[in-house]
Image: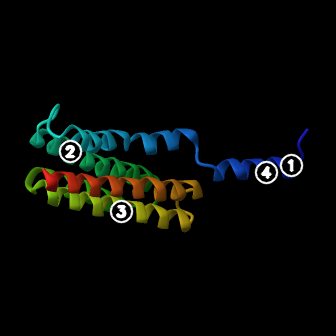
Amino acid sequence: MASSDEQKADTRTRRQQTPLRARILGFGSLVPLAALVALAVLDGGGALEAEEAETAIVTYALMLVVFQSGVRSGHAIGSFGIAPVALAGLAALIASVALLFAPAAVALGVTALGLAAQGAHDVWSSERGRLPPWFGRLRIQTASLAVLLTVAALLVVEGS
């Protein structure tokens, strides 16, 4: 039978490890954007017309911003009060306005900035103890990849 100290150490280790479900959701949410960018690059207008590809890429990239806003809102509601919830909602509003009114290149630029800012805020919150350590590590990886994919999408849209 494990001692109390061993049980505490095991519990601490489990809290620091990124849960498999979080990794699957975090990286899995990027697969459609990666697939759309790859399809647009490799297909060259075969299955998707340039305008359709652009709309799909911009829409999904902006959905990532809204998804991350939802994650931030869900956490903020339980712990930080109205300001963080309002800021998370503001990110979703900016993404929506960009989707509706901005040219694709501008919308993707706004998206890349939004994803980077949300990722940085999540890492900062994790380092301050407001979010679990594993969440900060996961967000460094997923936010970086999301920004890279969004910049790649921007290059694809500008090249079409």
How many numbered marks does the figure carry? 4
Secondary-structure class at tag 2? helix
Drawn side of residue 130 relative to residue 102, left or right: right
Tag 4 residue: 8
Q: Amino acid at mark 3?
A: Ala
Per the model, the C-alpha gap separating discs 3 and 2 is 17 Å
Q: Nearer the viewer, residue 159 or 101?
A: 159
Per the model, the C-alpha gap separating discs 2 and 4 is 45 Å
Give the mark nearest the N terminus, 3 or 2: 2
**Image position, residue 36 (x, y; %):** 26, 40
Drawn side of residue 78 relative to residue 61, left or right: right
Q: Amino acid at mark 4?
A: Lys
Q: Nearer the viewer, residue 34 or 14?
A: 34
Secondary-structure class at tag 1? helix
Q: Are the residues flagged by discs 1 and 4 in contact, CB closer than 8 Å?
A: yes
Q: Are the residues flagged by discs 4 and 3 in contact, CB closer than 8 Å?
A: no
**Image position, residue 30 (x, y; %):** 37, 44
Tag 3 residue: 116
Q: Nearer the viewer, residue 63 or 5?
A: 63
Per the model, the C-alpha gap separating discs 4 and 3 is 35 Å
Tell which tag, 2 or 1, sits nearer the viewer: 2
Q: Residue at x 44, y 52 (%)?
A: 142
Tag 2 residue: 59
Where on the picture, by quarter, is residue 120?
bottom left
Q: Are the residues flagged by discs 2 and 4 in contact, CB closer than 8 Å?
A: no
Tag 1 residue: 4
Per the model, the C-alpha gap separating discs 2 and 1 is 51 Å
